[in-house]
Amino acid sequence: MTNQHIRLLIVEDSEDDARLLYSELTRTNTDITYTRVDCAEDMRSALLDSEWDIVISDHSMPRFSSLEALDLLKECGKDIPFIIYSGDVSEHVEVAAMCSGAQDSIVKGNFARLLPAMEREIHGAAMRRAKEQADARVHKLAFYESLTGLPNRNLFCDYVGRKTGQADAQSAAIYVLDVDRFLRINNCFGHKVGDALIRRIGQRLQECVPEEGMVARLGSDEFAVFLGNTSGDEQARDGAERIRQAFSSPFVEGVLEFYISVSIGIVASPRDGDDIPELLINAETAMFRAKSMGGNNCQFYAREMGAVASAQLVLESALRKAVAREELLIEYQPNLNAVTGALTGVEALVRWRHPEMGLLQPDEFIPLANESGLITEIGNWVLLNACRQAKAWHDAGHTGLTIAVNISAVQFWQPGLVQVVEQVLAHTGIDPQCLELEITESVLMRHADTTIATLQALKSMRVKISVDDFGTGYSSLSYLRRFPIDILKIDKSFSCDVIKDVESAAIVQAIGALARGLGLVTVAEGVETVEQLEFFRQQHCDRVQGFLFSPPRSVADITEMLGARPGGQALQRPGIGARDHQMNHHVGQILTREFARGDA
Ligand code: C2E
Ligand code: CA
Ligand code: CA
């Protein structure tokens, strides 16, 4: 016999017979240990307490029999080869034993047969175990997710389908939840931290789910939860609250502390879908709704959401191809010197010429681009093309014309932003001082240290940093001192209000004073009336932008405007579009008058 260690369980009432068997076996293999049992209780504890490679059993004993031993083996759920080794085995017993699962039956003393039979059966059992392990691994791959070890979508559908399909099943709630702003964590702290967080989130979720429930990981930061029977929306909402509670304390990862919130979509089975895959899709739809409402909340699925969601999906897949199909275009809105009315620069504003839906404004697709991550590609495209265009204007003699490009928060946190800007500068040859990157106040407020590092890297290339929509966030004004910024763009909501609302006027005054103190350039956006223009001029605002002067325009229009006023004189005719030529002409006259009065 091969010299592998063999753990032998002998079922035998005679210790002498057992010892004889043992000494015969150790002639060819010295590495054998054995235990003898001769009744059901002893065999049961032997089976439960230890591992065995093979059982060799006498047939008939005073307190036990081989058939009873076989039954016990089955009862304990053990796959251990079983050989009957007995002096008196009738053909009838042999057949019964084989039917019960005995592998062989050998007459006592016939070692010439026993030894090869043992070897064959032990080897066979090892092969069976290896196959089982391989099957288990394949099963794990097919039904579990490797990062968290949680069930995947397949297993979740399978399990919940069985639970909710049972005859006595009540209605049940299914939740899909997604971590708010997870992309940012990944971008800021790297995938290692992101992965560790996902694992911890999985653990926390599992802790709040009862035994009959299930947590599955559906995608990068998306999980599904089944809590078992929940009858009625009231109970379903309580369940969602319990899940949200799991996120009330921060996640600690080394020295970092993360306060994480989730958006939850809820569906009721069977009300909201015919099968589990459909229920999950609908729960995802509701989750997206929760997300679009600012995150950190839960929403029940409603039929109307489905139509909106599928429309969004269709739009997203079209947007994916928009850059390659050259469907994006940029319009430019003039920035004017508030005192002289000279056109000092333009802001690049992207549009999408959708093949069926026509010209789409950024509000109709930028949020989707941010959510899907497409904003990086789109933003890089805008940056490159806006800089190219600005360079062309510079080369045509309009040197110093500034070009402002919007950078969304998602884009700002992308790992390669600084390199992208560097490449665009090198590639287009534009004077870096003419490029103004517009970031929102909210970018400044998150992760100040990382932000400062990125801003400094950009500043070292001599690019200008502009804070867009200023006044809408809640950063205290003194907070701004910490950041290397150049320009403040006062949000357009103030422009509407400065005339009629004293509070808005006071805020703008304060912003103006602070900006002067910090040596920042101020831009008032959304200036629509002459009164507003007058107000901002009184506040010593440096630049103005708004429909009063010109809406965003095509390259050709801007080129014409620039050409119409060589040497940077006041803008006489803002905008040249034939459609609103009349209006522009009118505005132009007002402007000429206003700027003339201001200069006087
Ligand atoms: P924003 O950066 O605040 O851009 C100014 C928006 O105000 C533009 O809208 C512009 O058309 C509008 N506007 C200009 N003058 C007036 C005015 O006098 N009154 C009023 N009520 N509105 C005025 P638009 O082009 O629809 O862009 C909306 C937003 O989309 C932008 O707001 C910006 O946040 C985003 N966006 C546009 N292009 C890009 C881009 O290339 N990348 C990124 N990340 N975001 C962009
Ligand atoms: Ca802007
Ligand atoms: Ca703005």
Image: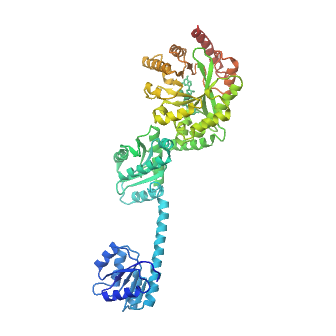
51 relative position to 596: left or right: left
Quadrant in which the C terminus is drawn: top right
Q: Position of residue 501 (x, y in %)?
A: 44, 18
Q: Is residue 99 above or below residue 289?
A: below
Please state which of residues 364 and 272 is positioned toward the viewer in this rendering: 364
Near-viewer residue (441 or 334):
441
Asked if residue 266 shows in the view, the reply is yes
Q: Identify the residue at image location x=54%, y=25%.
A: 486
Return the x and y of residue 31 as percentages of the image width and height. Answer: 41, 80
Residue 386 appears at what percent x and percent y?
64, 31
Residue 401 location, quadrant: top right
Determine the image quadrant of residue 178.
top left
Residue situated in front as seen by the camera: 556 or 397: 397
| Res 361 → quadrant | top right
**Lateral position of residue 363 relative to residue 507, left or right:** right
Please tell me whether residue 316 is drawn above or below residue 111 in the rendered image: above
